[in-house]
Image: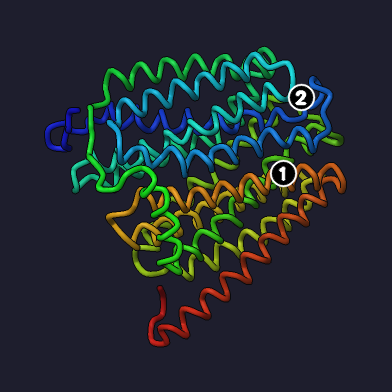
């Protein structure tokens, strides 16, 4: 296999843009269903709790892919791996587009979710190809594409559903995935860096990292709780907005993703603050804002202004905590960043899957206030846990202000 180094394969602005677009497109495939859950539930005669399983399946299969598929990037030629995973994710989208029953839709969702972890192969690949002096900028650009994909998927899905129906979203997504894959095959360089560990050792070494680093365990727990809150909100938001007094259609519901994007993108400077040694303080502040956001979201049943403000604050705070987590996790071992990323994101998406499942059940039984109490409860747990983390760090390093 060809081993192209960053110097022999300079990372052009066009390739950076393509990689950022790809990460956004593949991750978006896990979120198209969220603003459409009420429509899917009606057409397939499902309860809201059963419809919520669609989102849970996407996030759980993504978590499994993070552990079982992402480490392959250290074993096989990257371009070939990326293209194959993209094509398989597209197959999942085609199955979802053809679905006329919940089991078929879940099968397509699971396949797409598992192979859409190709985004987590592209991010370290971009870092590998980039020259050292522009590496941070390149990774930030690619990660921005991923974030926008998560948040804008709802807006796109709502608009496409209004033009056709919910199946239309998956047909269009599959077509875009194919075009994107062809571009990757044409423009990505070949790259293979043989690993010193075989596949089984790579997988088991992730567990070893959890055992070795206390901070890794702590930050992963916070990631679990944070993304659980994110999923609690976005899984049930469509149920709230489609019901009285709002009665919004899919396109209007999808527009609420823009509010989330505005909040999350405003937190892009969190990594800089973490670099300067303010990680613990930023974490506490972020979680306090998360708790406050649920107070505003609780008023969302009667006030759109409060609902929008709550969405902006929740996504801003969550992204700040997440970026801080990633910054501190990657600092633990520069030779194991792919595996550190794999393990952290595995736990992160398990939190998302758990939050989705619990949110749909809470809405089914207690309505919007059940969802709000669930989210606020998770915020309280995260605040107490981060307080214990801070107290432990101060006991261990009594003369250090931040860690």
- Please provide percent x and percent y for residue 309: 66, 49
Asked if 345 appears above or below 86 in the picture, the reply is: below
- Please provide percent x and percent y for residue 323: 45, 54
Q: On the rendered image, what quadrant is the C terminus found in?
A: bottom left
User: Which disc is residue 357 wearing?
Assistant: 1
Quarter of the image for residue 180 reads top left
User: Which disc is residue 136 wearing?
Assistant: none
Q: Residue at x 39, y 23 (%)?
A: 84
Residue closest to the far left: 8
Q: Residue at x 65, y 30 (%)?
A: 254
**In the visual, does 245 lie left or right of 92?**
right
- At mark 2, the secondary structure is helix
- Please provide percent x and percent y for residue 295: 73, 58
**In the visual, does 43 lie left or right of 261?**
right
Q: Identify residue for label 2.
A: 39
Asked if 395 appears above or below 79 in the picture, the reply is: below
Q: Residue at x 79, y 21 (%)?
A: 44
Q: Residue at x 30, y 38 (%)?
A: 75
Badge 2 local density, few (<14 within 10 Å), some, or many (20+)? many
């Amino acid at each position: 296999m060809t081993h192209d180094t960053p110097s022999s394969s300079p990372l052009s602005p066009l390739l950076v843009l393509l990689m950022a677009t790809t990460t956004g497109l593949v991750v978006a495939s896990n979120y198209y269903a969220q603003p459409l859950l009420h429509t899917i539930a009606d057409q397939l005669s499902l309860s809201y709790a059963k419809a919520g399983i669609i989102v849970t399946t996407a996030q759980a299969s993504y978590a499994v892919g993070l552990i079982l598929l992402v480490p392959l990037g250290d074993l096989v030629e990257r371009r070939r791996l990326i293209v194959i995973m993209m094509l398989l994710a597209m197959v999942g989208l085609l199955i979802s587009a053809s679905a006329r029953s919940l089991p078929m839709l879940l099968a397509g969702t699971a396949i797409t979710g598992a192979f859409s972890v190709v985004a987590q192969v592209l991010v370290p690949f971009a870092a590998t190809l980039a020259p050292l002096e522009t590496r941070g900028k390149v990774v930030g650009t690619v990660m921005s594409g991923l974030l926008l994909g998560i948040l804008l998927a709802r807006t796109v899905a709502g608009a496409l559903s209004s033009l056709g129906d919910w199946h239309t979203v998956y047909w269009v997504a599959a077509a875009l995935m194919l075009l994107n894959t062809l571009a990757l095959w044409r423009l990505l360089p070949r790259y293979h860096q043989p690993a010193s560990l075989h596949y089984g050792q790579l997988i088991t070494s992730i567990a070893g990292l959890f055992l070795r680093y206390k901070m890794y365990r702590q930050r992963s727990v916070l990631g679990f709780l944070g993304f659980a809150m994110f999923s609690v909100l976005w899984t049930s938001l469509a149920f709230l907005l489609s019901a009285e007094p709002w009665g919004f259609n899919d396109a209007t519901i999808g527009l609420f993703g823009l509010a989330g994007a505005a909040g999350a993108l405003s937190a892009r400077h969190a990594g800089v603050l973490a670099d300067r040694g303010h990680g613990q303080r930023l974490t506490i502040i972020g979680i306090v804002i998360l708790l406050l956001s649920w107070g505003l979201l609780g008023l969302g049943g009667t006030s759109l202004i409060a609902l929008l403000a709550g969405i902006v604050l929740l996504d801003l705070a969550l992204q700040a905590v997440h970026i801080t987590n990633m910054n501190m996790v990657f600092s633990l071992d520069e030779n194991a960043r792919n595996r550190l990323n794999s393990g952290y994101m595995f736990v992160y998406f398990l939190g998302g899957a758990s939050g989705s499942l619990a949110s749909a059940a809470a809405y089914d039984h207690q309505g919007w206030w059940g969802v709000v109490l669930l989210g606020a409860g998770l915020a309280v747990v995260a605040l107490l846990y981060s307080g214990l983390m801070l107290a432990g760090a101060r006991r261990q390093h009594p003369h250090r202000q931040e860690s």
